Amino acid sequence: GRAEALQETPGAGSAGRAGGAVEGRDGAAPGGAARAARLALAARPAGTLREECQAREPWDSGTALSRSRAGGERQRRPEPQRQHESGRRGPTPADARRAAAAVPARAMGAPWGRAAGRRFGRRRGRGLLPSASALAAAGLLCTALAAFCCWRQLPPLPWASSAPPRPVAVLLWWEPFAGRDSGARPPPDCWLRFNISGCRLLTDRAAYGEAQAVLFHHRDLVKEPRDWPPPWGAPVLWADELELRVLDDEEAVAAEALATSGLRPPGQRWVWMNFESPSHSPGLRNLAGNLFNWTLSYRADSDIFVPYGYLYPRTHPSDQPLGLAPPLARKRGLVAWVVSNWDERQARVRYYHQLSQHVSVDVFGRSGPGRPVPSIGLLHTVARYKFYLAFENSQHLDYITEKLWRNALLAGAVPVVLGPDRANYERFMPRGAFIHVDDFPSASSLAAYLLFLDRNPAVYRRYFSWRRSYAVHITSFWDEPWCRACQAVQSAGDRPKSIRNLARWFER
């Protein structure tokens, strides 16, 4: 079996032939061939077997590839995952050990018992030629050792070819925040936008039964009246008829919808999509258990993880943001903050009041003490400041929004963050790329540190060292989550799953 595996592997021709020769000797080898082999082995100096094993090593990937090219064959390196899924593999160290262990000790010339030891001792000096079985064992052992030494260099397996992703249809039940009566805009091209192929994005509810996944945006999901897909196989109620029934008995219809909404087409996934924090997700606890079997959110433990932004390795000089550090000559202000939802009860507003007593903060926005964003736009406005308050409206696991990725990092300001703890931020970005309010015992000490950085440009520039290696990606809503859902369904297979308590998972 071992010899057959090596013979089937392209580029392992020498090992395959060695294995075949061993198999012939173990079988009905002609007597003349065996005698000739014994004479040849007796004529070798000591250590020749080891040299032969070392001589076998050139059947590595380079030699095999040159042979295949000479024969007109083409080799292609497969994807590691596809190679694993093929169910067949090249030799590994464990295979080599098993092959060596499979050879009977008697065939390898090993003595058994005291008498055998005495015989071996008496005959050792007589120059007794090894038997054919010993030759077979030596050849097989040498092949196994060569495989053990070179298994990492084996050429790619020909049957492990990458296949295009399977076609997947994903239905967006509502366009988020657009209203239920608004016309559906054309779906994005996932291939052109995000290099994801095989996606069929749907907005027509008549194709509900054809979709492998259906996206439900939470804010639109909890609006009244409830707008659920009809139970699979049940009569469809048109919108006007459903509205009349809701007016007659709203609670009963909602309960009926919750009870029967689990009857979806076989294999279809209902994806709960939400990018708000638990503090700003009303109606979360009113959703029935087992209603959704997938989640899509900024949470890293979601079934479909789509953060507000992320850093990726810089591959081209045009990757954003440009340059190793923003020009300091353009930075006329010290601290900026853009806020659209002003609430005195929020921790970020309370911290702002404390910080502004020790350092000047320019606030922009539609509410609170903010003034309108200048016509040059938000990014150009923030770029004029050295620091930006990337303060989240609530503190929850992984809740790190565009306030950090777009407003601060892309604009070229050092982010001062208030949100989850520092360790959570460091899961997604270098520790020296931001300032966390938790690093300081008080707002006054933070203000003193910002003033120190303002007076020391060399220390301030260290907060931009990440730009040598990384660029910033800003998530495109709602096109990117839609395409990422398609990509996730393509790679997930048919694993069944359900979420028994959505609120408990999201609020922890």
Image (cartoon, rainbow, N blue to C red):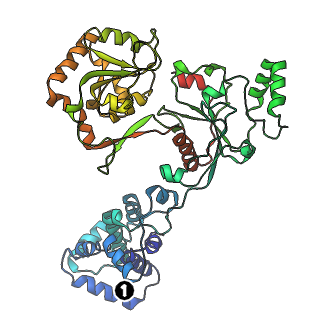
Residue drawn 37% across and 83% down?
A: 70
Please, what is the three-letter code of the amino acid marked with disc 1?
Answer: Ala
Residue 463: where, in percent of width, then height?
A: 24, 31
| Residue 27, image x, y percentages | 46, 80
Q: Is residue 424 left or right of residue 260?
A: left
Q: Please state if 233 lies on the left or on the right of 272 as rendered.
A: right
Residue placed at 39% from the left, 33% from the top? 406
Q: Which residue is mark 1?
A: 34
Q: Quadrant of residue 372?
A: top left
Secondary structure beneath dot 1 equals helix
Residue placed farthest to the bottom in the image? Answer: 32
User: Residue at the front extreme?
Assistant: 375
**Mark 1, other Cα within 10 Å: few <14 / some 14–19 / many ≥20:** some
Residue sitting nearer the eye, 2 or 60: 60
Q: Is residue 364 above or below residue 9?
A: above
Residue depicted at 32% across the width and 66% down the height: 150
Q: Is there any visible trace of residue 454 in the rendered image? A: yes
Q: Is residue 134 visible?
A: no
| Residue 259 quadrant | top right
Residue for point 39% across, 29% down? 375
In front of the other: 13 or 365: 365
Question: Where does the image place residue 395, in percent across and percent down from the top left?
Answer: 44, 19
- Where residue 357 appears, x then y in whole percent? 28, 8
Q: Nearer the viewer, residue 428 or 129?
A: 428
Q: How many marks?
A: 1
